[in-house]
Image (cartoon, rainbow, N blue to C red):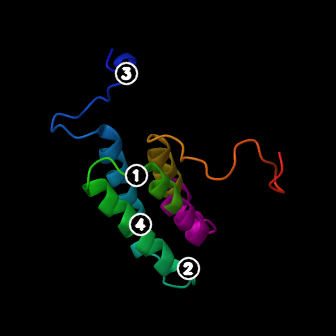
């Protein structure tokens, strides 16, 4: 019933469950990243963006475009680490619950910028 009215359900604490899910998924991925050997060059990028995602989850409902930007950076930084595949997918699903990022650029334009 709530969704049909455009309202989001909240947890018993009054928190948006999407935010709680994002915080949980990010926390899990950060823990799994922390136990891996520091061998890949983009680890600091992943850690920084996961920290940014965690901060966004603490601040209430985050900005959708910023969530997607951080997700892309994390995926690019750790996407090839098979041990993190499941946790990265969980973060992606949590981000997707907030909706699609607004598209930038001209509507109806092709790759070359022409309609």
Q: Are marks 2 and 1 in contact (CB under 8 Å)?
A: no
Q: Is residue 8 above or below residue 28?
A: above
Answer yes or no: do the residues labelled 1 and 4 have beta carbons within 8 Å? no
C-alpha span from label 3 to label 1? 20 Å
Residue pictured at 57% horizontal, 82% vertical = 40
Specify the label residue 3 is tagged with. Answer: 3
Q: Nearer the viewer, mark 4 or mark 3?
A: 3
Q: Position of residue 69 (x, y in %)?
A: 52, 60
What is the crowding at mark 4: few (fewer than 14 residues within 10 Å), some, or many (at least 20)? many
Residue 81 in view here: no
On the image, the x and y values in percent for residue 93 come to 49, 45
Please name the residue shown 61% across and 68% down the image. 76
Is 94 covered by the magenta stretch? Answer: no
Spatial distance from mark 2 to mark 1, Cα to Cα? 24 Å
In front: label 3 or label 1: 1
When the figure is inspected, residue 49 is found, relative to residue 61, above or below; the finding is: below
Question: How far apart in space, not on screen, are marks 4 and 2 (Cα)?
Answer: 12 Å
Asked whether residue 106 is in view, the answer is yes
Q: Main secondary structure of the magenta part?
A: helix
Image quarter for residue 5?
Answer: top left
Instruction: In the rendered structure, find residue 63 and report the number of the disc placed on it.
Output: 1
Magenta span covers which residues? 70-86
The percent position of residue 46, horizontal first and vertical second, equals 48, 72
- In the figure, is residue 92 to the left or right of 24? right
Which badge, 1 or 4, comes first in the chain's sequence?
4
**Residue at the image position 37 percent from the left and 66 percent from the top:** 52
Q: Which residue is mark 2?
A: 42
- Asked if the residues shown at circle 2 and circle 3 are in contact, with their CB atoms under 8 angstroms apart, the answer is no
Which marked residue is nearer to the observer: mark 2 or mark 3?
Answer: 3
47 left or right of 12 in image: right
Residue behind mark 4: 50
């Amino acid at each position: 019933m709530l969704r049909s009215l455009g309202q989001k359900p909240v947890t018993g604490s009054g928190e948006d469950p999407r935010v709680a899910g994002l915080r949980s998924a990010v926390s899990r991925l950060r823990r799994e990243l922390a136990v891996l050997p520091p061998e890949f060059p983009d680890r600091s990028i992943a850690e920084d963006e996961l920290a940014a995602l965690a901060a966004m989850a603490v601040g209430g409902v985050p900005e959708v475009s910023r969530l997607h930007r951080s997700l892309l950076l994390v995926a690019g930084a750790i996407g090839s680490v098979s041990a993190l595949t499941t946790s990265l997918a969980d973060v992606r699903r949590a981000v997707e619950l907030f909706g699609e990022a607004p598209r930038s650029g001209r509507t109806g334009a092709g790759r070359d910028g022409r309609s």
